Image: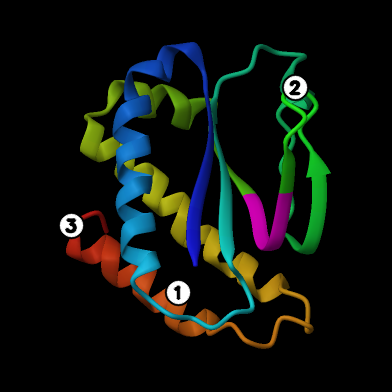
Amino acid sequence: MKFTLSLTLGKEAQSKAATINNFFRDIDAFIQRKNYGNGILEYFIICQIINPPNGYEHLFKDIKPKFIEFKSLINKHTGEPLVIEKQFSYSIKIKREKFIEFINASDKESIKMIVSEILNSLSNLDALPKKVKDFDKDSFKEDMKRFFDEQNLI
């Protein structure tokens, strides 16, 4: 299984982009060594670390948990085909007061804030459709907690 991140950062948080991307690469490397079944091939988190001005919050909507069995697209810009298969996705956010805390914290403390959001978001797996039978969500949740614990992030 692949663990993927889409990162949206407010300009004040741009300095943390490399740290966050490296952290998600570490999670991906850890997850790829595991086998949870073939029900989910990609676990995709849209991570928004933002502080939108008043009146612009609607541009950063929460993305509810979604499972895509199969979808074939064409990239508008390159014309290349794109196939999405057995992808589970949703968003997490750090905004407003937490955003200010995030940008003022050390890199490790900032990562701890993301970890807290990820751990809270694991309950989204309970929204998996019944057709996803071959995925061991309990083992996945436990492995994620163990990984964060081993990294001293919880």
Residue tagged by mark 1? 141
Colour scheme employed for the rendering of this structure: rainbow
Find residue 32 and report its horizontal and vertical position in percent. Answer: 39, 66
Q: Quadrant of residue 152?
A: bottom left
Circles 3, 2 touching at the beta carbon (< 8 Å): no
Label 2 or label 1, whichever comes before in sequence order = 2
Pick the front one: 54 or 138: 138
Q: Main secondary structure of the magenta part?
A: strand
Left/right placement of residue 154 relative to residue 27 reads left
Mark 2 highlights which residue? 77
Magenta span of residues: 83-90
Amino acid under disc 3? Asn
Q: CA distance from mark 1 to mark 3?
A: 17 Å
Counting residues from the N terminus, which is met first, the one under dot 3 or under dot 2? Answer: 2
Mark 2–mark 1 CB contact (< 8 Å): no
- Amino acid carrying mark 1 in the image: Lys
Q: Nearer the viewer, mark 2 or mark 1?
A: 2
SS label for mark 2: loop
Res. 13 image quadrant? top left
Q: Position of residue 114 (x, y in %)?
A: 41, 44
Height in image: 126 above or below 45?
below
The three-letter code of the residue at mark 2 reads His
Where residue 43 appears, as percent x and y from the top left, is 56, 60
Q: Position of residue 96 (x, y in %)?
A: 54, 25
- Point out which mark residue 152 bears: 3
Q: Counting other residues with Cα less than 10 Å from the Cα at mark 2, is it few (<14), some (14-19), or many (20 or more)?
A: few
Marks 3 and 2, Cα distance to the nearest angstrom? 41 Å
Residue at image coords 45%, 76%: 140
**Residue 125, numbered label:** none
Relative horizontal placement of residue 44, taking residue 61 as reference (left or right): left
Residue drawn at (38%, 26%) of the image: 17
| 45 sits left or right of 68 in the view | left
